[in-house]
Image: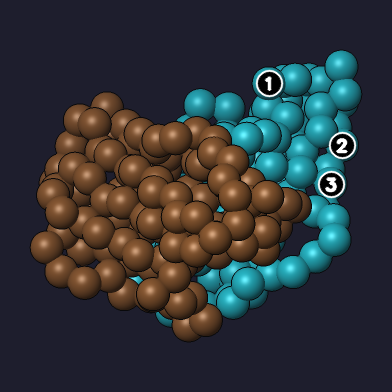
Chain colours: A brown, B cyan
Amino acid sequence: GAVVSQHPSWVICKSGTSVKIECRSLDFQATTMFWYRQFPKQSLMLMATSNEGSKATYEQGVEKDKFLINHASLTLSTLTVTSAHPEDSSFYICSAVSRLSPSPLHFGNGTRLTVT
Amino acid sequence: GESVGLHLPTLSVQEGDNSIINCAYSNSASDYFIWYKQESGKGPQFIIDIRSNMDKRQGQRVTVLLNKTVKHLSLQIAATQPGDSAVYFCAEKQGNTPLVFGKGTRLSVIA
């Protein structure tokens, strides 16, 4: 149980285009989803917290207009990287908190974004 | 905050030996701690967790120790196997605040 699915697992896009990443909780309802970014050989850095039906809360230094988050249902959150640049190339990982069992946090398998 | 480093600390152990991975956490008010295993190209995989009212918790082949006095967390893996090779992260949490990850340690198992 507690499976989190991310799609796509990898994507290559051209500079200036936008990319949407989906995060789904497959067998549970997630009141809250988190989006992390991970650069090579580094730890996971929290970008934003997404609550179903409300606006996302962004961490300091993360541009909300560049990283659009939508949490339209209890099983789906999306992250859209708008006007992507090469420096946005990274590993993006989502996690979800079960409505019934808040702990532990379950993670998706990540999305490798490469901007050329 | 974000940890920046050129290299992850690496622990090399012989197959069959026990491994101990250490983590110093930053928030003395953290009340929940998790160890995650991350294989290359994948998301973090839950290993074991512990709440601050405990100092030890055991799972299958893994043990987590918590020393709140010095803000130290450790993960012990018994009889380490090649499949245990990965990067291990500790993470801490206070109440309903988001999970904060430590820097990570790469475990390399020598067959």
* Callout 2 and callout 1 share a chain: yes
Q: Amino acid at mark 2?
A: Ser
Neighbourhood count class around disc 3 (C-alpha, 10 Å): few under 14, some 14–19, many 20 upward: few
Residue A52 x/y as whole percent: 16, 59
User: Under tag 3, what secondary structure?
Assistant: strand
Q: Amino acid at mark 1?
A: Gly
Residue to which mark 3 is pinned = B10
In this view, which residue lies farthest toward the top? B111
Residue B83 got which mark?
A: 1
Residue A104 relative to residue A90: left or right: left
Residue to which mark 2 is pinned = B12
Residue A67 relative to residue A99: left or right: right
Q: Is residue A116 above or below residue A61?
A: above
* Residue in front for this viewpoint, B61 or B106: B106
Label 2 resides on the chain identified as B
Residue B49 x/y as whole percent: 44, 48
Taking the spot 59% from the left edge, 41% from the top edge, the residue there is: A12
